[in-house]
Amino acid sequence: MKTPTATYRLQFRGDMDFAAAVEIVPYLKQLGVSHLYASPIFTATSGSTHGYDVTDHNEIDPVLGGRAGFDRLCEALRAAGLGLILDIVPNHMAASMENPWWRDVVEWGAQSRFAGHFDIDWSRKLTLPILGKPFDDAVAAGEISLLLEGDLGSLALAYFDNHIPLHPASWEQVLARIEDPAAAFLAEAAGRSDPKDPQWLREQVVATKVSTRFGDELASLSRDHAFLSSLYEEQPWELMFWKEARRTLSYRRFFEITGLAGVRVEDPAVFDDVHRLTLELVASGQVDGLRVDHVDGLADPAGYLRMLREAAGPETYIVVEKILAPGEELPADWPIEGTTGYEFIDATVDLLADAGGLETLSKAYEAFTGASPLEFSRRKAKTEILTVNFEGELTRLTETLVTIAEGRLTYEELRAGLVALIVAMPVYRTYVGEGRAGDADRAALDRAFTEVREQNPEVPTAVLEFIDGVLAGGDRPGDVTRRARQLFQQLSSPAMAKGVEDTLFYRDHRLLAFNEVGCEPDRPAPSLARFHDGMRRRQESFPLSLSGTATHDTKRGEDARTRLLALTAEPENWAGLMVRWCAANAHLLRHVDGRPVPDPEVEWMIYQALMAAWPAELDTDDGNGIAALRERFLAFLTKAMREAKLRTTWTHIDEAFEGAISAYAEGILEPGSAFLSDFVRDTEPFRAAGRSNSLSQLLVKLTAPGIPDIYQGTEISDFSLVDPDNRRPVDFPSLQAHLAASRTPKTFAEWKTRILAVGLEARHDRVDLFSSGEYRPLDVSGVGRAKVVAFARVKGKDAAIIVVPRMPTPSETSNSDWGDTVVCLPALLAGRKYRERLSGRVVESSLDLAIGDVLAGQPGALLLSD
């Protein structure tokens, strides 16, 4: 296996294609990463900004440069000694007519060669939620028409830009009413067509010349509403008002996105079709590793990963996108190297946040806002998402349980029990297969059932026992029971993701740093002991997991988040500033529907978010700079308010409310205003503490168990807001310049680049030490012991000692006076000579290392044994 020493995540699309990636290969080599970690590169829908809406798994997107461009990139990487990791998307594909598999399914229904490729309920028609109103209303409005798609070889119904192919068996109804020689030929061809060989019919249509009269008669038929309705009834699909999709949909979707249809890769034939090109690229040696997107969406993640491992071989590096809840471990039997590293974000909280300060900040937030207790807000958010946004999925699962219950329990009882249980689930999902639940799954279910009994005593015990019997598994489950378990596991995951990540995170704002993928507001109290324990367990279980601090999906940039963690060092100071700022800007409040906008909870969020995102070098009188920040910030607030789903949503936009939020933000971002000058001055201590936090976080990421993953552009600073802000184009020439300047660092950005380059060099030089070396926490004593963390990596006679500050106090101008603070070394590490890699100094070690001498004014220390 070509194990990465460090990865560099690159977002393709927009201004980044294969040719542009070739240009930055020398920079990546100089920076010191071992692998380019690419976002999805397979053909996606037109205009896709991310590539997760795949339309063809077996074609490299021509938009990026196609196979030829990909080959040139691989040649450039190979020449530089770098590898490639691909992000693959087995869970879903675009439900788009650009997707030939989906188009075939729409055209032929259950007869399609690909009918089993998608997770579709074929007991009913395939639902297509594309209408802006009910079908009959759309017909009456003249929005539905007939057309011949000559280039695609089909007869179709058109709804604006949506062209939905008709089943060939229904063509005769249309063509019999058209007086054109081509109509008779096409009718005969349609009658002879075979769903196993649809290409033949398409070729006949493409080759057929039709007259202008043919089109005119189709237009005339389109005005016959009764005929259109009759024709519509003959199709294997039904057109739906898009707002009804949450209630009734015949296919599994990705989260709430009806444009992404679930794929049944648990079927070996489907697996082969989906992975044909991916495995070819692996076998060719062009691809060293795979990142599996959204593994929890699959019907059988463990089974899928076993198939992938067998097909890709033992030499392929494989990681999965998996969010681990507090205390949850990755299943030990998954044949992979680990996760994409969201859990490392949670670990940085233990490293950099103060538990006592967090509690004080939380109480100040509740006093300031009158917010509900966190657990109440969490349960409310998950319940709303489950019963509203996933109403159709919940109904399907409930009906399946009703079938199993055979009249012993009612639909209403089972639905209430399921809602209570899914809301109480402490993890994203369980992984119960054919047998009984394993220890981890059993423990998760037990926790959930215990909470249901405490919080929902109205749910009958018989209901809970029945559901438990279905979910916990048995030796020989029937098909319906197996299906119910699968539906439950594939529903609990999106309910958690959308209820917590994309709802609660935008409602509860006590500390925005906790509202992050991989972390959450009600995580255990921060603890350095918990950090050390987590790193030890990581080294023992999945030491080759990625360590991420920023991704294309994180809610805030990695340096924005470390600024926010600094609030826990002086929570009273922040709370006092909040009172003063809100009073100063009370004149900006507006009233919408009799309520002030923004309310105190949103105000608390706005000032945290602004402090976190404030550009490092931005002056308060820089009109252009503030205008650019304002544009980004207003877009973030609009998304945040809609995701909260309280006063406005993506589907029911309250323009007056959103306008009042925007006006408030514009008011506080007035260039040269007294408030803005005060705000920047008052928050500078927190931002300075955040800079210290950032450099500590980076050095730890580079040296702790795991493979450091560098997200594009974060080498100098990352104060991004939620996507799409964190997917902005990257100025690679500027990054190259910073890399050169970092040899003698002066600014934060230069120090960050310096630590990154030195840390990556150390990992390259001592591969075994950092990939498989033992993780050893080191004791610290003295007056500053709570403000520093130290640990060692040990592999045989090789050793590294890492020392970084933690939890700097914002009001202190300097953290350089360490007094009697020392790192206590065990005999194994004492009495040796080390070289501090950031400065080049030689350090002779005794049983105690004085922190002041080790850091010597630097933001951290990396000592490698000679």
Image: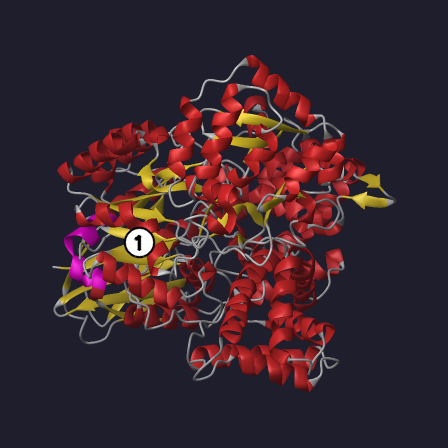
At 62% from the left edge and 23% from the top edge, which residue is drawn?
218
At 47% from the left edge and 77% from the top edge, which residue is drawn?
441
Q: In which quarter of the image is residue 321?
A: bottom left
Indicate the quadrant containing the C terminus: top left, top right, bottom left or bottom right. bottom left
Q: Nearer the viewer, residue 821 or 587?
A: 587
Q: Is residue 161 left or right of residue 666?
A: left
Main SS class of the magenta portion in the image: helix
**Magenta region includes residue 558:** no
Mark 1, residue position: 272
Q: Position of residue 482 (x, y in %)?
A: 49, 73
The magenta stretch is 760-771
Tell me the amino acid under the disc marked 1. Asp
Q: What element carries label 1?
A: helix
Q: Where is residue 582 in the image (x, y as percent from the top left)?
A: 73, 44
**Magenta region includes residue 761:** yes
Q: Which of 711 and 427 is in front in this view?
A: 427
At 38% from the left edge and 60% from the top edge, which residue is drawn?
267
Q: Quadrant of residue 171?
A: top right
Q: Where is residue 270 in the image (x, y as percent from the top left)?
A: 36, 54
At 44% from the left edge and 71% from the top edge, which residue is drawn?
431
